[in-house]
Image (cartoon, coloured by chain):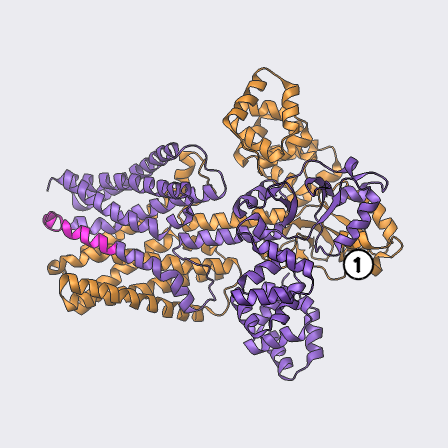
Chain colours: A orange, B purple
Amino acid sequence: MALEITKELIENVEDLILNKKDVALNDFFAETHHADIAEVLEELSFDDAIYIIRLLDSETTADVLMDVDEDVREKIFERLSSKEIAEEIEELDTDDAADVIAELPEERKQEVIQKIEDKEHAKEIVELLRYDEDTAGGLMAKELVKVNENWNVLTCVKEMRLQAEEVTRVHSIYVVDSDGKLKGRLSLKDLLMASTRSKIADVYIPKVDFVNVHDKAEDIANVMMKYDLEAIPVVDELGVLVGRITIDDIVDVIKEEADKDYQLAAGITQDVEAGDSIIQLTKARLPWLFLGLIGGIGAFLIMGEFEHTFKKHAFLFFFTPLIAAMAGNVGVQSSAIIVQGLANDDVKGSIKNRLVKEMLLALLNGVVLAIFLFLFVLAYERDFMKALAISVSLIVVIVVAGLIGTFIPLFLDKRGIDPAIATGPFITTSNDIFGILIYFLIAQLILGV
Amino acid sequence: MALEITKELIENVEDLILNKKDVALNDFFAETHHADIAEVLEELSFDDAIYIIRLLDSETTADVLMDVDEDVREKIFERLSSKEIAEEIEELDTDDAADVIAELPEERKQEVIQKIEDKEHAKEIVELLRYDEDTAGGLMAKELVKVNENWNVLTCVKEMRLQAEEVTRVHSIYVVDSDGKLKGRLSLKDLLMASTRSKIADVYIPKVDFVNVHDKAEDIANVMMKYDLEAIPVVDELGVLVGRITIDDIVDVIKEEADKDYQLAAGITQDVEAGDSIIQLTKARLPWLFLGLIGGIGAFLIMGEFEHTFKKHAFLFFFTPLIAAMAGNVGVQSSAIIVQGLANDDVKGSIKNRLVKEMLLALLNGVVLAIFLFLFVLAYERDFMKALAISVSLIVVIVVAGLIGTFIPLFLDKRGIDPAIATGPFITTSNDIFGILIYFLIAQLILGV
């Protein structure tokens, strides 16, 4: 399992740096995975981290830099020359290289790209920079193994050996025609089993899943999960093979998407972590709290309107937290189911059918809860009409909250807006207000005051 | 991209079934990916689905059955004989086979296992059934390619060709000693480049990541994501290679874990989808709503206690939804950050440090919001003391809510309980009650009534 980054380990490294024991440091890090080196760097002082980056060879540090947090990377790059950054980039696959360059300030970008010695690599990176980062083009790497359908297996194996040196992991061998159009694939296993004399055109599998360079990351993730793919080729508008996406990048997409939805549901914008600074965390949290505050002031104003009406029934006010909480809970539940269903692409049928189903569901839940509440109020206050007013309100509030919770994410999705923003504080706040308003109106109607 | 399951397509299939056009059906499904066939089956009537399962060969239907929803699979299996199920199972990899068998009723399990003709396969499945499904043992498959360190490359390639026939995707070739202990690995790429005369002991890479058969699924997912692995070997207590886990299973773990946490945060237990029945959805949602109801009744009782004290200041009651909402929002935010941090294994430092940080964060947010609320109340009610009472309460409530939201998931995690249950309704409900109580106590103190 993973290396444990202990306090002793960090102190040990700091000691070696202080005493400039470069050989010992090199030996230690040579045995350490780049993902672990990245964690060590994040624990070190900034100067120590730079020391290590300059000490180790760029083949290692390029991978390490990919693994550190974006803000740490940014700071390190500020201290490195464009030449030094270009050297790191030479060691990266094109997709990672493009991601790193995309983070640089505009003028730095140009400088670094010009300093890349391998002009072919630079050209490919520039091509990748053109694509939106949330599309196939933004995720794909140019590194892949492709063979021409007109070759025979012998030529193919020779060519592949050359190409494979560039490619970290060979998943599939893609077969193209003379125009570079994707025709099919060869699996390494097939190749392992095939005789060297066969012709590629005779042995390749013409059925191959692929995505278009402009397809969305989330859709690609769903396709790769559905078909259990570990890599998928990317073609342009003409069907020409332009890159491939591997499952490790998709795992990151799935994880980030899930984390983002979870945070939005909890009322946290931006991508923050437990370890981030108080200022960063405040930026991510305060806007939602402010929304809640505005909602609370709205509730205050509504209740104030009913003050004179309910002078005799002050206890009605004591049920507002209950009503507001139920409206909020139901709203979050129903919106969460829709948001998740949309993300997993399994919300089928029309909006109308969804709303009818949610209405029945909310009605069922509402009636069960209302019966319980009715009995409680009847026992506690010994007043049938009051118990009735509160229970009927609860049912109506739950149904309305469920409908709002279902409708808003569906509506946002239709409009092309991320429905995940609908869950959490947004729904709870609006449902608080609607819930309280509905509650007092119904109570007024039933109690006739 | 994925096949579109249109209404016409389904009607077409239903038509073919009605007219018993078996050849046309076979032709159509031969061209269709098993994941798509699974979706078609889920749209068909139950009898039609059974018809298709019996029509297609078991090599296809085994994969299809893995892809349909668990409850559909259960129903289909009820209609198939143990012999028929065993035939499907023969076609599956050991990990999938064990998962499917684990779902069967106890007496059916034995019957099916005994009907599996390949006794070696049956033995491996029985071995896998011993492990908890959330551990490496529960995730791993027995299918892998392993070679002995004492072989030469030629023997190795011969052996591998035999073994590779059993394995869907070859990721790595694992090297073991004569006792079966894991020594290292060979990548297919290395093999592609290596000369046939070398000895395995001279060419293998002795550094290999692995997990223990009892390691937890979530930890394995973190390791595989961190090190970008596509497969990881599993060893037993003696270091003997017993299986391997592939990234596609880990993708499912990540996705399920994220979905579950998201649902818990929204107050939904059990694994439900938008398409599930109203009864299933009610079972998943009602318990949390009931919790909210109990909380609301608690809030009602607390407010009732203060009725006489605040007779003159009825408007104080009108701020309870605001206080409750803020307490709930802050609690959910802070617990969500901790839950996510725990899942991603990046919550470092002691509980005390966490609480101090959250206190400062909540204080900062609280003060900003309280100033705004203070100015509003002052402008609206023109009463300094009232404005002060409400604003000070807000700050205290936010700080306490933040501390509760941070502490509970950390506490649950230390106790070995899934901290994700702490987010959502659980936190909002308890924070509602604490918040309201604190609010009235502080208001009483400041207003001196």
Quick one: quadrant of the C terminus of chain A? Answer: bottom left
Q: On the rendered structure, is B236 left or right of B391? A: right
Expressed as whole percent of the image width and height from the top left, the position of residue B86 reads 63, 67
In the image, A106 versus B327, the foreground residue is B327
Expressed as whole percent of the image width and height from the top left, the position of residue A375 reads 21, 65
Q: Residue B349, located in which quarter of the rendered image?
A: top left
Q: Is residue B84 visible?
A: yes
Q: Does the segment drawn in magenta span residue A289?
A: no
The correct choice, above or below, for B357 with respect to B45 in the image is: above
The correct choice, above or below, for A90 with respect to B301 in the image is: above
Expressed as whole percent of the image width and height from the top left, the position of residue B416 reads 43, 44
**Residue at the location (53% across, 43% down)?**
B219
Q: On the rendered structure, is B269 left or right of A347? A: left
**Which amino acid does the dot numbered 1 rest on?**
Tyr
Q: Secondary structure at mark 1?
A: loop
Q: Does the segment drawn in magenta span residue B306?
A: yes
Helix, strand or loop: magenta stretch: helix
Q: Is residue A134 visible?
A: no
How dense is the environment of label 1, judged by Cα within 10 Å: few (below 14), some, or many (20 and up)?
some
The correct choice, above or below, for A260 with respect to B73 in the image is: above
In the image, B39 versus A350, the foreground residue is B39
Q: Dot 1 corresponds to which residue?
A: A204
Marker count (numbered): 1
